[in-house]
Amino acid sequence: MKANDNLVLRATKKYPEFQSRLNQVHQLLIIQDLSENTFRNYTPQLSKVVIEFGCMPEELSDNQLQSFLYRVSVNDRIQGWSTKKMLICALRFYFRAIGEPARALTLPKNRTDKRIPKVLSERQMKKIILAAPELRHRVLLATLYGLGIRAGELLNICWHDINFDRSQVIIRKTKGGDQRILPLGKALLKGLVALREIACSEYVFASPKTRSKPSAKSIKWIIDKAFNETGINSKGISAHVFRHTYATHLLEMGLDIYSVKNLLGHVKIETTLVYLHVAQLHPKASFSPLDVILGERKRSTQ
C-alpha cells in the first residue's frame, strides 16, 4: 500500500494537474456507486502511466499506449494477468471520467479469467471457523462462508440491515451497486444474535477498540490467525476463497446453478459456471480410467 501511495504522490507532485484528473475519476466512481477500493486500485496504475511518459494519459497517442501495454504484457507472462487487467480497467475508466469515452473503446479487451478458483473442503471450513477464539471473529468467518459475500460487502453490514425475525440480511454496498437479500440460516442467526448482545457500533463487525467500520486489512488478519490456529496452509487464501467455497459447496449440496448465481449477485450466469469445474457433483463418476484398466476399480455396468 505504501508503494502505491508513493507512486500517486510522485505523479501528483511532478504534475499537479494530474490531481484534478484523479478527482474527476473519483467523482465518477461515487456517481456510479463503486467502492473506494476501486479508486485505490486504479490510482497507482494511472500514476505509472504519468510517471512513465511525463504527461497526462490523454496526451498520449494510441501507438504510445499500445507500446506501453505491450511492455506490461511481456512482464505479465511472468507476473500474472492481474497487473495488466487492472491497468486496462483504470485507463478505460479514466477516459470515461474525463469525457473521452471513444478512447476507452480503443483499448484492448480483457480476456476472460479462466483460472480455477481455490476451494476449501467442508472439514477444513468447519475447522477454521471453530478455531477462532473470539466470538466476533468466529461470526465474521461464518458470515463470509455462510453468505458467500465479498469482503467489501461484509465490512458495510450494519445491524439495521439484519431482519432477525425473517432470518435475512440486506447486502447494500455490492460490487454492481444492486442490493440483494440473503437468507441467514439457523447457525449464522444464532451467532449474530449472540454478537448483538455485545454490539459496540452500528457496524456488525466493528472492532471494540475503534468502534468504527472494520477494514479489509483486519479481515485478512482474522483469516490468517484462524488458519494459523488450525495449521492449514494459508498460502493464497483471502476472503474471496470463502466465497468460492460457499458457491462450490452449495452446488455439491444440490442447489441449482441459477439459484447460486442469484445468491452471489452475479450479473451473468457465465461467471457462476466456473464453479462447476471444481464442484464434485457426481462423486461416483469421478475416478481415473487407469484404475479400471489395471483392476483397481470395477468397471461400471450402468
Image: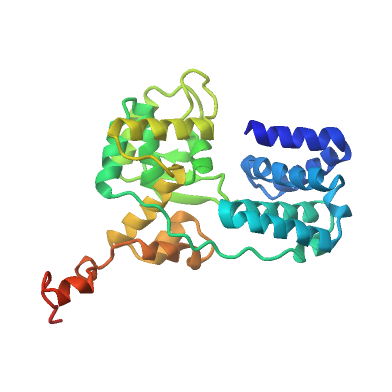
Left or right: where 83 falls relative to 163:
right
Q: Nearer the viewer, residue 225 or 292?
A: 292
Q: Residue most toward the bottom?
A: 301
Residue 175 lies, in percent from the top left, at 57, 50
Left or right: where 69 falls relative to 242:
right
Look at 79% across and 51% down and name the residue there: 97
Residue 147 lies, in percent from the top left, at 40, 47
Q: Is residue 58 visible?
A: yes
Look at 29% across and 35% down and name the residue there: 231
Q: Residue most toward the top?
A: 209
Look at 57% across and 44% down and name the residue there: 173
Instruction: Report the number of numbered marks.
Output: 0
Q: Nearer the viewer, residue 198 or 127?
A: 127
Residue 182 lies, in percent from the top left, at 42, 49
Give the answer, above or below, for where 100 lies relative to 173.
Answer: below
Look at 12% across and 82% down and name the residue there: 301
Residue 247 lies, in percent from the top left, at 38, 55
Q: Give the image quarter of residue 2.
A: top right
Q: Give the image quarter of residue 188.
A: top left
